[in-house]
Image (cartoon, rainbow, N blue to C red):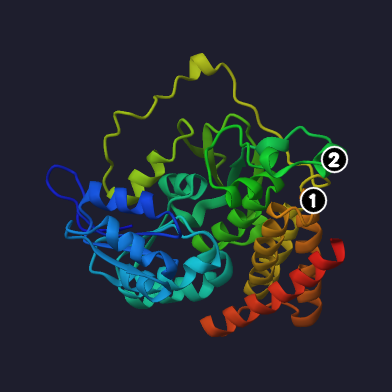
Amino acid sequence: MVARPLTADRHFRVAALTAHRDVEGLAAAALETSAEFAVIADPSLYGELKGRLQGSGVEAAAGPDALVEAAQRPADCVVAAIVGVAGLRPTLAAVRTGCRVAIANKESLVCAGRLMIDAARASGAVLLPIDSEHNAIFQVLQQKARVSQLILTASGGPFRDTPLDQMRAATVEQACDHPNWKMGPKISIDSATMMNKGLELIEAAYLFDTSEDRIDIVIHPQSIVHSLVAYDDGSVLAQLGMPDMRTPISYALAYPHRMALPGVARLDLARLGQLDFSVPDPARFPAIGQSRAACAAGGKACIALNAANEEAVAAFRDKRIGLLGITEVTGAVLEDTLRASGGGEPDSFDHMFELDAAARRGALRCISRLN
């Protein structure tokens, strides 16, 4: 979403909306918000979108170039929420305009963290995280020089307490059945393997300019404490709230202000009774260790890990590999990448896309062997 500045009554004017293939949802949202521009990523659906918007005054477009055009439209804030590395070009286009960019697409920082941060500094753009964990850190991060540790919380996903042999037989439907959050299939499966948390560790390292060994991950099944920041005087600050993405989204949209959200449930600690925390099991969730290794090695390894994961998740959804096959693929591709390159950062965005393509080829070979 591309939004123009907040008005006196705290409403936004929507400059542009985009979607991948959901023409009906995009058209309905564009009409409801009186958006100026609506883009469907799949060019084959342009005719249907244009027909649904006929006579509304909303301009319709389609294809990758139109996504970039939407991101470049004059705006106060751009929400970057396209899933996967496909969202990188539009996100970069928004960053280069110098506006505020609310990032829900973690791959933009996982795959091009240093490049994206440098681009934001050059343009004056402000990067604001929408992920609930990073948004929580952003809200309580003070006196950065005094920070000793960032602590990301994880629900543990649908297999938090599931034995490894049962995880091996898990179905796509079971992997997508998240206990706390309603998310798309890719992010839900990433949560099931805890790769989502590993990628968030990498994102946090770039976003908050810290090393992976100063970022911890704890399982917190209630999803009430969204993240914590520990300081060198022993203080630990946390952001708490009900598991509702409207809160972090509103904070990023309205920053540096806050928006009243009457429809969001209020936190009642006495009614909850207790909050639980535990350490993730590395045997059942190797994705966290892989992400740490990639983050320590640098951007090239992070690109390979993300690309391999995207291909492996697609293969799992197509029932070509099992759930545990996802981290088998990511582990193999990461090992090959580290052996070949030894780590380091990509030289440019073009170099990043080359590394991404190479890692995907390696992932597909590994998937073929597993299949």
Q: Quadrant of the C terminus?
A: bottom right
* Whether residue 290 is situated above or below residue 220 in the rendered picture: below
Mark 2 falls on what kind of element? helix
Q: Which residue is denoted by mark 1 in the rendering?
A: 322
Q: At which x and y percent is residue 269?
A: 49, 20
Tell me if mark 2 has few (under 14), some (14-19) or many (20+) residues whose alpha carbon lies within 10 angstroms of its own. Answer: some
What's the mark number on residue 137? none
Q: Quadrant of the N terminus?
A: bottom left
For the question of whether residue 156 can be seen, the reply is no
Q: Nearer the viewer, residue 16 or 129?
A: 16
215 on left or right of 48 = right
Q: At which x and y percent is residue 361?
A: 72, 76
11 on left or right of 317 = left
Residue at point 59% right, 48% down? 185
Tell me if mark 1 has few (under 14), some (14-19) or many (20+) residues whose alpha carbon lies within 10 angstroms of its own. Answer: many
* Whether residue 153 is situated above or below residue 58 in the rendered picture: above
Residue at point 59% right, 20% down? 274
Q: Quadrant of residue 325?
A: bottom right
For the question of whether residue 86 can be seen, the reply is yes
Residue at point 61% right, 78% down? 345
Residue at point 78% right, 52% down? 286
Q: Quadrant of residue 68?
A: bottom left
Q: At which x and y percent is residue 306?
A: 64, 64
What's the mark number on residue 164? 2
Say whether disc 1 or disc 2 marks the residue closer to the N-terminus: 2
11 on left or right of 320 = left
CA distance separating discs 1 and 2: 12 Å
Give the label, 1 or 2, closer to the camera. 1
* Whether residue 51 is situated above or below residue 154 in the rendered picture: below
Q: At which x and y percent is residue 311?
A: 68, 64
Give the amino acid at mark 2: Leu
* Whether residue 308 is situated above or below residue 123 in the rendered picture: above
